[in-house]
């Protein structure tokens, strides 16, 4: 069961990483096509391309950090300083997505925009707090390694 779960999770992370890169690169083209159906996207084409592309870049960076953390989990060595750094970065990237999405409020307000802001703010704060927990675990691990 665990082996299947690990393989599935790795596949999903890899898929999301590469699909995220592709999606982010194609934002200008996708929005150009979609603007034929939605006048809002036609009217705010450039600002929306910039905002969604920036958010996409930060989302890909988050998934990249998750992939790094996952590698340490698969080799059974997850309480390391690199994971603390990855969690801090993920928190920062999440807050950046929330702030970028706040900039979208200037253009339009929808429940989805507000939900994205809330979710990424919570995710950012959670990642920052989790990095502190991992930092403590790393410190305890290092102390125990020195004791032995």
Image (cartoon, rainbow, N blue to C red):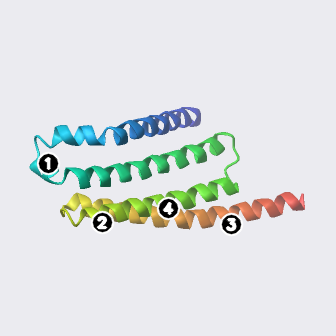
State the CA–CA distance, disc 2 to disc 4. 17 Å
Pointer 3 residue: 136
How many labels sit on residues?
A: 4
Q: Quadrant of residue 110?
A: bottom left
N-terminal label among 3 and 4: 4
Pointer 4 residue: 91
Quadrant occupied by the N terminus: top right
Give the foreground label among 1 and 3: 1
State the CA–CA distance, disc 1 to disc 3. 50 Å
State the CA–CA distance, disc 3 to disc 4. 17 Å
Give the foreground label among 1 and 2: 1
Pointer 1 residue: 42
Of residues 141 and 110, which is closer to you in this image?
Answer: 110
State the CA–CA distance, disc 4 to disc 1. 33 Å
Pointer 2 residue: 102
77 over 96 or under it: above or below: above
105 over 30 or under it: above or below: below
Of residues 77 and 105, which is closer to you in this image?
Answer: 105
Residue drawn 40% across and 65% down?
A: 121
Of residues 79 and 42, which is closer to you in this image?
Answer: 42
Residue drawn 16% across and 49% down?
A: 41
Give the foreground label among 3 and 4: 4
Whether the residues at callouts 1 and 2 have beta carbons within 8 Å, the answer is: no
23 over 136 or under it: above or below: above
The spot of residue 102 in percent (x, y) is: 30, 66
Category of crowding for the residue at label 2, using alpha-carbon neighbours closer than 10 angstroms: few (below 14), some (14–19), many (at least 20): some
Whether the residues at callouts 4 and 1 have beta carbons within 8 Å, the answer is: no
N-terminal label among 1 and 2: 1
Give the foreground label among 2 and 3: 2
């Amino acid at each position: 069961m665990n082996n299947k779960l690990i393989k599935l999770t790795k596949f999903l992370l890899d898929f999301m990483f590469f699909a995220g890169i592709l999606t982010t690169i194609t934002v200008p083209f996708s929005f150009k096509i979609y603007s034929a159906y939605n006048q809002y996207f036609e009217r705010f084409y450039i600002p929306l391309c910039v905002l969604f592309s920036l958010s996409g870049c930060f989302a890909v960076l988050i998934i990249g950090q998750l992939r790094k953390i996952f590698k340490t989990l698969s080799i059974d060595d997850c309480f390391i300083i690199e994971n603390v750094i990855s969690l801090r970065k993920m928190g920062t990237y999440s807050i950046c997505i929330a702030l970028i999405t706040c900039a979208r409020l200037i253009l339009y307000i929808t429940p989805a925009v507000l939900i994205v802001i809330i979710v990424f703010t919570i995710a950012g704060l959670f990642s920052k707090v989790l990095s502190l927990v991992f930092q403590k675990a790393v410190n305890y691990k290092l102390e125990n390694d020195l004791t032995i």
